[in-house]
Image (spheres, helix red, strand yellow):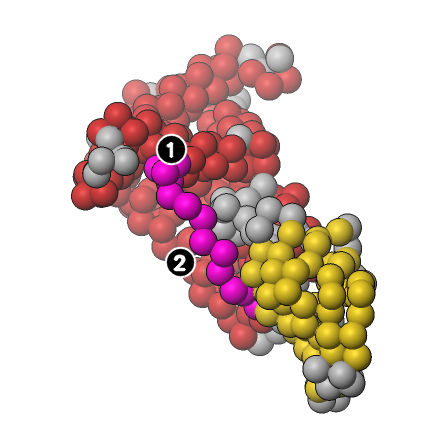
Amino acid sequence: MKFLLGDTIDKIFFIESLKILFFVSLLIFSLDFLLNFVKEMEDLNEDYSFSDALNYIFYISLSRLCEILPLCSVISAILTFGFLNDSGELIAAQILGKSLIINVLNILKPIALILVLTLFSFEYVTPELEKFAKGIKHKNQSSINQSDWLQKNNVLANYSVGENFGSNVKLYFLDDKKKLQSIVEAKSFEIKEKRWKLNQAYDLITKKEFEEYFWDEAPDVGLNEDLGIKELPLSQVYKILSQTGPEREKKKISYEFWKKLLEPLSAISIILLSVALSLFLFERNKNLERLLFGALMAFGFNLILKIFGNIAIINNISPSLAIFIPSVLVGFIGLRMLKN
């Protein structure tokens, strides 16, 4: 605990940072709750009551809190730095031998801890909250079995799928030159581990019938998910990524995976740059300006990552590099500015 909190001055900075992060998160959570409330009022009906809407909004806003924590972190870090500077505590700490970088790192300790905890939330908490919320809103709606497409290696599949079984499947087998070799169809199929079992299958080209037909190395995850890629646990997204077919689709999923996984690094990097810039841009008692600056920096950097991500997807570059390199570069620039 002493390693985390440090001495008395470090503890003051840690507590002040944690306190402001809590109030900023509470404020943004309340705004998000209010916006969702206004939106959900339009969907009220006999099957979706006012109390259902309130429960749905609460769980959805709670699950989305992890998504907005990086924004909260940037704003709270700049505000904490500004408050400590305005009160003279930052100067006092420097007089006592604490360098500016050490002081900033003390402000970052609780933020980094919370951001790392969000990764565990993405895996174990937010997916369950999303499912629970959607169960409240769509409890009286019957699920529709829709046709979908996927590709794995040289096989294209068109299918409809339930929980662990499917219907109306057609498998299009291509050779290495992408020429059609065979089409196997079946009225029903079962999803096994890493393969599909087609019942009463028929090859439309060779006119051959099969009592049972197995598509080996077929995907077994991500076929009938209630949640989208952004809401799924990181481990599930990784499994889907390993089984996705088209390269462009794989890059899109990879971008979402790495963006979420590297969120703590990206947030800390933009905090370092934002705090360094705030030293030159703002005088004492300019906290409203700092708040707006923090929000703009967070949104702006997020936009830059999306631009780099799209460039990586289009040009067949690893999306992880499109997120990692700008984050490290921004963090390095921020550290250099704080040193100088």
Q: Confirm whether the magenta stretch covers residue 143.
A: yes
- Do we see residue 5 in this rendering? yes
Residue 223 is situated, as x and y percent measured from the top left of the image, at 60, 55
* 280, 21: nearer the viewer: 21
Disc 1 from disc 2: Cα separation: 33 Å
Q: Residues within 10 Å of mark 2 (few under 14, many from 20)?
A: few
What residue is at 50 percent from the left and 25 percent from the top?
110
Please name the amino acid that badge 2 sits on: Leu
Q: Which residue is mark 1?
A: 136
Q: Looking at the image, which residue is at 45% across and 48% down?
A: 143
Type of amino acid under label 1 = Ile
Residue 334: mark: none
Where is mark 2, residue-wise? 303
- 7 up-or-down from 269: above or below: above
Please give the range of residues in magenta. 137-151
Quadrant of residue 174 within the rendered picture = bottom right
* Camera-side mark, 1 or 2: 1
